[in-house]
Image (tube, rainbow, N blue to C red):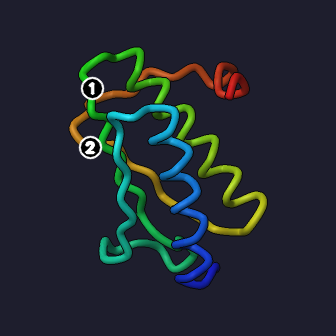
Amino acid sequence: MATREETERRVEEIIDAVTREFPGASISLDFDTPRGEHEDGFLWITPGTDDREEINEIWGYAIKLVQDAYQEDDVYLVARMRGVGVIDRDRPADADF
């Protein structure tokens, strides 16, 4: 499990990358939502659009960065998207990011 400071640093990098690529999107880090003992925090993603294709792109990009955080720094984040029903995402396309 990462320290709070390590988690905050890595999440700031994720926020910067996602909002640079998708200016309408916003992300917040939540330490208060109950989580498993191995989970470092929740990421709440607000897409800032109703365009399903863009929502799917935001999700794919954010998840790639979340996976990188785990693989590179052992920061385990749980990502959730606000205001979105089902996210359609084909796994092979994740490699595009």
Q: Quadrant of residue 56?
A: top left
Residue drawn 38% across the image and 48% down it: 80
Residue under numbered circle 2: 82
Identity of the amino acid at label 2? Arg
Reply above or below: 1 against 14. below
Q: What element carries label 1?
A: loop
What residue type is disc 1 on? Thr
Mark 2 residue crowding within 10 angstroms, few (<14) / some (14–19) / many (20+): few
Residue 77, percent from left and from top:
53, 61
Instruction: From the image, tell me which residue sits under label 1.
Output: 49
Question: Could you tell me residue 58's position as x and y percent?
Answer: 46, 31
Point 70% across, 22% down: residue: 96
Marks 1/2: CA–CA distance: 11 Å
Q: Where residue 7 sits in the image (x, y, percent)?
A: 56, 73
Q: Is residue 22 left or right of residue 94?
A: left
Residue at the (76%, 58%) spot, across then down: 71
